[in-house]
Image (cartoon, rainbow, N blue to C red):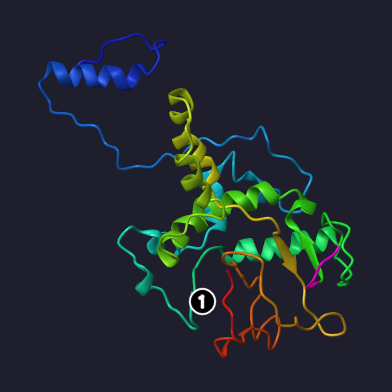
Amino acid sequence: MQIRGAENEENYLYSSIASAAVSKNIFMHVDNRFDYGYLTNPNSFTLDHLHNDLWQIFDNPLDWEEIYIHPEYHQWARKEVKMGDFEQPCSDVFWVPLMSEVFCKQLIEEMEHYGKWSDGSNYDPRLEGGYENVPTRDIHMRQIDWEDHWIHVLRKYVYPLQLKLFEGYWDKVGAFQLQLRVLDLPKSVLRLLPLIFFVLLQPWARMNFVVRYQQGEQPSLRYHHDASSYTLDMALNRVHIDYQGGGVRFKRYNCTLVDTRVG
């Protein structure tokens, strides 16, 4: 085959070989078996934190998910997976693989790096009323500028699982949908309601925080009822390696959850 074309032309060699093959009636096909990667967005990356990749959930979601979401998460989020498939150690308590060990380790390190743990008293100036009924030694997500990022995790990753585990429950403002429907509203407003419902029914959480338990400070927490429709309780460090004991006691069900799994 004779290869023709100017060497200064873009993709000269590839286009010339292809042209020569076509002229000889040689079959060609596109090979898409190789993954050449994808583009990342560096514009929002800063050096303000200890682990700056944690803050890339919005601008580089593929990289972020690969690093920080539990490797088994997607197999449990599949449509065919039902509530009965999840392990349930206590009534209405489910084991759910959500975050990776890397995430848990880096979140601990970020909180320790920030270092401004609450004093564990009922007085808490971070709250609107300044009073915490069941205080812990903790740092709120908003204190390290990670509140919006965690809410995004709830909406994108927790919400699909929650729909399986608590069927029929959408969010705390779900009842607002029924109230709106009975109003005598103009048609122009009614066309906006599906969008309004979508926004309102997104998962939302008022308090998101990391708690620290340790001897000589706060080793445990008294019995209480969380002011939430459901609670996400995640172990960040490794039992029998980083600590001994621990766990969660559900008094009403006479059930104790021990050896909590990271993530």
Magenta segment includes 165: no
- Residue 28 at x, y = what percent? 18, 29
Residue 59, visible in the rendered structure: yes
- Residue 10 at x, y = what percent? 40, 14
Residue positioned 63% across, 73% down in the render: 235
Side of 37 where 215 appears, left or right: right
Quadrant of the image containing the C terminus: bottom right
Q: Secondary structure at mark 1?
A: loop
**Disc 1 crowd, CA 10 A, few/some/many (<14, 14-19, 20+):** some
Viewer-nearest residue: 256 or 104? 256
Viewer-nearest residue: 39 or 244? 244
Relative to 38, say whether 237 is above or below. Answer: below
Residue 174, visible in the rendered structure: no
Residue positioned 55% across, 52% down in the render: 203
Relative to 171, say whether 97 is above or below. Answer: below
Q: Dot 1 corresponds to which residue?
A: 93
Q: Which residues are magenta?
A: 131-135
The quarter holding residue 130 reads: bottom right
The quarter holding residue 126 reads: bottom right
**Residue that extends furthest to the left in the rendered view of this protein:** 25
Relative to 172, say whether 44 is above or below. Answer: above
Quadrant of the image containing the N terminus: top left
**Residue that extends furthest to the front in the rendered view of this protein:** 184
Q: Main secondary structure of the magenta part?
A: loop
* Dot 1 amino acid type: Val
